[in-house]
Image (cartoon, helix red, strand yellow):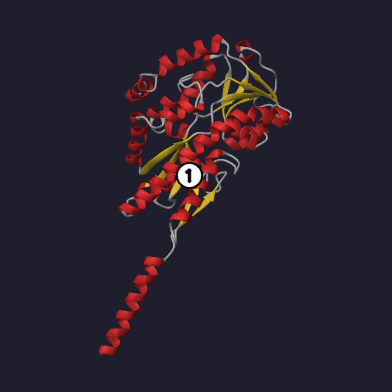
Amino acid sequence: MNTIKGLIAGAIAALGVATLTQADELRISTPTPPPHIFTKTANHMAEALASSSQDDTLAVFPVNKLGNVPTVLSLLQSGALEMAVVPVGDLANRDPAFLAWFLPYQFENLAEAGAAAQSAPAREMLDRLERQGLVGLGYVFPGQRHVLSKSEITDASDLSGLKIRAFPNDIFSAWWREVDAAPTALPLPEIMPSLVTGVIDAVDVDLDIVMGLKMFEQAPNLIMTNHMSFPGAILASKQWWDGLSAEDQANIESIVSDSTAWALEAQIKTEAALPGVLADNGANVTTIDDAALRTAGAAVTEAFLERDPMIKTFYDANR
């Protein structure tokens, strides 16, 4: 009998050791190709996790390989996926507070937008995601928004009637209608074929995705309008997160903090260099700062400030 008890105890002990040492194979989804800062940040997190843990790994799935953003959000909510980088524009369709990030001309450059991510209202927006089964861990920035067009644009009047791909949420549509353009909401994979077929004439875009997808081959005119910021949010499944120890949570939070700081510094340098790189690759790079655009931006800001109390709180905190 003692022998049997000893064998059972040994088996339980062995099982316990196996459980403790079993590697956790975590996954993170991004909507962008590998050269984009969203995916680079996820890879940076994966490398940091590998360095900080003997067992855990983080596999990166770019270009929506695990599904489009709504699918990825559902996977997070159910606990079937651990982490994802999601454009804040998609979150704004679920919680209007996030529209605060897209008030036109709120930030003059990427450094200002990055600093705003450290503000209390920016953090509170992420905290509000818990009611949706999500944990907001931080923000990552691909750069300011510009216009990529098939035709040359020299001032605001050239935007009139332009069929432009706009991110599918209210404030992007309102902005482009305010400058008399014709916004068309399209998912990322449909942009290139729509340029080829003439469904759209131009794209509201960040420079990283222009370079990553070589969009300039179909629309060679890059107009540096600098009209909006466009952050992504690094999200975790609340169901998965709540099952972690406090130590593991702190480790992930530290990795995200270090990775987003790295990404912001890297992207500020990249955004300064990319116009030259794109010009060397055949893009016609110009800059417009037409007063009419600023006037339109002020009108859109006024229209959206009261959409949610958090929008004005964020705006006032970062002026």
Drawn side of residue 181 relative to residue 125, left or right: right
The structure residue drawn at horizontal position 43% and vertical position 50%, both measured from the top left corner, is: 82
Query: Please, which residue is most extreme toward the left here?
Result: 1
Count up the numbered dots. 1
Drawn side of residue 316 relative to residue 2, left or right: right
Instruction: Describe the element under mark 1 as helix, strand or loop.
Output: helix
* Residue 79 location (% of width, % of height): 39, 51
| Image position of 154 with respect to 188: above or below | above
* Residue 24 location (% of width, % of height): 43, 59
Q: Which residue is mark 1?
A: 71
Residue nearest the viewer, comparing 184 with 220? 220
Residue nearest the viewer, comparing 74 with 115? 115
The structure residue drawn at horizontal position 27% and vertical position 84%, both measured from the top left corner, is: 5
Drawn side of residue 280 relative to residue 127, left or right: right
Q: Amino acid at mark 1?
A: Thr
* Residue 251 location (% of width, % of height): 38, 50
* Residue 134 location (% of width, % of height): 37, 43
The structure residue drawn at horizontal position 40% and vertical position 33%, both measured from the top left corner, is: 94
Q: Quadrant of the C terminus?
A: top left
Category of crowding for the residue at label 1, using alpha-carbon neighbours closer than 10 angstroms: few (below 14), some (14–19), many (at least 20): few
Q: Quadrant of the N terminus?
A: bottom left
The structure residue drawn at horizontal position 52% and vertical position 46%, both measured from the top left corner, is: 67
